[in-house]
Amino acid sequence: DGVTLTVPVALLNQVPAARCEWLVRGLLKEKVQALAKSMPQRLRHKLGPLAEFAQAFAAAVPPSDAPLAQALARYIRAELNLEVPADAFRPDSAPPHLHMNFRVIDEHGRQLGLGRNLAELKRALAGETETALREETQAEPGERHTAWTCGDLEDLMEIRRGGQTLVGYPALEDTGEAVVLQVFDSPEKAHAVHRQGVKRLLMLAFRDRVRELEKALARDVALAACRDDLVSAALDRTFLADSLPMTQAEFARRVVEGKSRLNLIAQELQRLAGAILAEHAQVQKRIASVHKAHPQAAEDVRGQCARLLAPQWLARTPWERLQHLARYLKGAALRLDKLRADPARDARCAAELAPLEQAWRRELAARAKYGNPAPELEQFGWLLEELRVSLFAQELRTPVPVSAKRLAKLWQSMRR
């Protein structure tokens, strides 16, 4: 039934998903052949005899931390000068014995889980993994802190346990009215939790100011709905713009330095958010008026708005990008205004944008599957917004020159 990897639960999150797709040397050729066979016919026949193609790939490309489909796409591009999207391969079409089987055990060797879907096992057993880590680090789960009174945090903790090294990532976790020190099994999870924990300590340190800000926002009908988001964004921008403090002294320094800036930054955010929401309201009106005659363009703009103003958009959008949101929305409104006069032009522009946007979304989804953060993909997403302005609302100008051709070139260089 193929290859089974036995993993102690405390080490589960250290298992690299992409690396495991390469299996063992003896089965790689068979797996590559199965993946090549799953490609659409128009691409598949360009590979020549699949057995020979698989043999050549297995001989030329050593296993790496890149997902197998990505490595295959790269190899085909280099050897055959053929563009293949990573999702042209259907991994589920390969027989079960060509997928790694994972057996997860506890410290006594008892089986906790068995399966070929590593992401699902990690999700199902996340609690067990963290419990094992916390037992080893003796993180006191009950001790609540309303100020930074828990000492300094290490970036990473290595714990020796029966010949194995467990790796844990400490963070302050927000419990509502206080924080507790916890250990997590992945740096991404610890970072996200720690950010919220530090923000809770800032809210407690500036309790009165936060209350005044919330009162002022409650009086503004448009902003009342994103009150918590705006407070969170103001704390982020004021105190956590550079990095997250991991020590008591660093936290205290940030509090002193940011104290005088908090009100100004909150006011600036309020002004920005008001302008963005006003533009958003205009776009929604335009969508409603053109939807019947031009459903495709209307839906495309609706999707664009949903991405730009996704939940917690104020706190999640980087500060330098927040200042461009109103322009992106104004561009979307202008696009819908021009649509009636020249629908053919809109369709041509949409056709230039679509392949780039689809490739970007596919890559984002693939990275999410492996839990990989993707800062360069995030940047590319903002360039796509600039491309929308350049295609549909040139009169608004873009801060950098963009075109579909330029972005296609950049995309190719990112994929190498």
Image: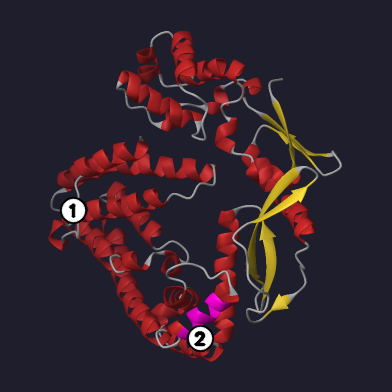
* Magenta stretch holds residue 326: no
Name which quarter of the figure residue 145 lies in: bottom right
Question: Which residue type does callout 2 highlight?
Answer: Val
Q: Is 139 rendered above or below residue 177?
A: above
- SS category of the residue bearing label 2: helix
Circle 2 residue: 210
Quadrant where the N terminus lies? top right
What is the number of the mark on residue 390?
1
The mark found on residue 288 in the picture is none
- Quick one: SS at disc 1? helix
Q: Position of residue 396 (x, y in %)?
A: 16, 62
Mark 2 neighbour class, 10 Å CA radius: few under 14, some 14 to 19, many 20 or more: many
Q: Could you tell me what secondary structure mostly forms the magenta stretch? A: helix
Q: What colour scheme governs how the chains and residues are painted in the rendered image of this protein?
A: secondary structure
Residue 148 position (above or below residue 127): below
Residue 97 appears anywhere in the view: yes
**Residue at mark 2 to residue at mark 1: CA–CA distance:** 40 Å
Tell me the amino acid under the disc marked 1. Answer: Ser
